[in-house]
Amino acid sequence: MTSDRTIHTVTSPISGVPSNDRHRAASSRDLSVDTLRGLACILLVTYHVIGDKASAGIHVDDDSVLRYYSDSVEYLRMPLFTFLSGLVYSWRPLSALQDYPSFMTKKARRLLVPYVIFVPILGATQLVAPGVNGTVDPNPLLWWINSLSPYWFLLSTFWLFALVALLDSYGVLRSPWFFGGLFTVSVTISLLFRPETLETLQLGTALTFLPFFLAGIAAFRFRLIPRRVSTAILTTVVLVALLVTVQFALLGNLDHIDARHSVIGIALGIVFPTAFLGWGLRSRLLAWIGGYSSGIYLLHSFAIGFFRAVLSAIGIDNTAIVFTVLSLCGVFASILGIVILRQITIGPWAIGRIMLGEKAPHGS
């Protein structure tokens, strides 16, 4: 991984380019952002391989190194995906109310169509093989209403886009004061309540992750990503302090720090990507993986479940080997699945791309 300090002076989606250049910048890919996407995919897959408790995933002990790793990743994994969603939205935000229906139609294609398709597929898989890919409620209707992991993120992100785009269409989020007030309210809600306990259509979860989504928007809109070395250093010092504090808590030297409902947990989920982008860190491998991030999110559960069953069938149960194989397959087999799905068509319909929430290529 390399660092490019010229990122703040070149025309880039995150470099604070002049307004007349923003459309061109927003239509291009940013290597640092894609690198961060790739890292988010690695954290996502490895976390799901391990599982959030000893009875999930590959059943690692609560006092193992892998459990320590997964507990640490919890502070970064989903906040990172949410922050990036807000950041990318800020490149081309909605500016007119009449465009709101069209905007949300595109988000429905991108988020709700895959949700409706993959939730029952995963639910059926878990019913047939509960020991391989988790367990599920026997009532299929609840799969859509309360969601199945990891697809809850699709629903919650849809609501975030719906709220923020509507406010943007009225122009109220252009004011730093109004934006800051909304961010403060969102953080306060997360500190005082646990909105995600409202599972219906993941509306509560959307409130829990609203601070990270808003932070991603603000990072670009108000030029909060460090553009000077001194500011990047200061941001990194804050990041290290947050990381050390969380590690002390995980090791039992401090009281538990909630990843979603504490000032430190929320701050860590925001400061980490801010510092990362401030240094312009980039890796072509991670950026390549990040280019498939949406598809990896959709398919990794199936890849992990399939290869876990294969390893079990051939008698491989060494934790280190299983973790490594499933992590690699969770990423790269998912990418292979994306490539294959993109080739599947039925008549004029690009069925595979529809499943992935993608738009059919021009001329198809």
Image (cartoon, rainbow, N blue to C red):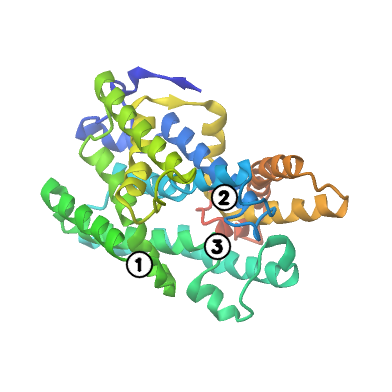
Task: Please tell me which of labels 2 and 3 falls first in the chain.
Answer: 3
Q: Label 2 belongs to which residue?
A: 295
In the displayed structure image, the side of residue 37 where residue 21 appears, left or right: left
Looking at the picture, which amino acid does disc 1 mark? Answer: Pro
Structural distance between the alpha carbons of marks 1 and 3: 17 Å
Residue 220 appears in the rendering: yes
Q: Label 1 belongs to which residue?
A: 195
Tag 1–tag 3 contact (CB < 8 Å): no
Tag 2–tag 3 contact (CB < 8 Å): no
Structural distance between the alpha carbons of marks 2 and 3: 15 Å
Looking at the picture, which amino acid does disc 3 mark? Answer: Ser
Q: Residue furthest front?
A: 253
In the displayed structure image, the side of residue 53 where residue 328 appears, left or right: right
Tell us which disc is closer to us: 2 or 1: 1
Q: Label 3 belongs to which residue?
A: 149
User: Residue 231 occupies which quadrant of the picture?
Assistant: top left
Q: Nearer the viewer, residue 78 or 33?
A: 78
Task: Please tell me which of labels 1 and 3 falls first in the chain.
Answer: 3
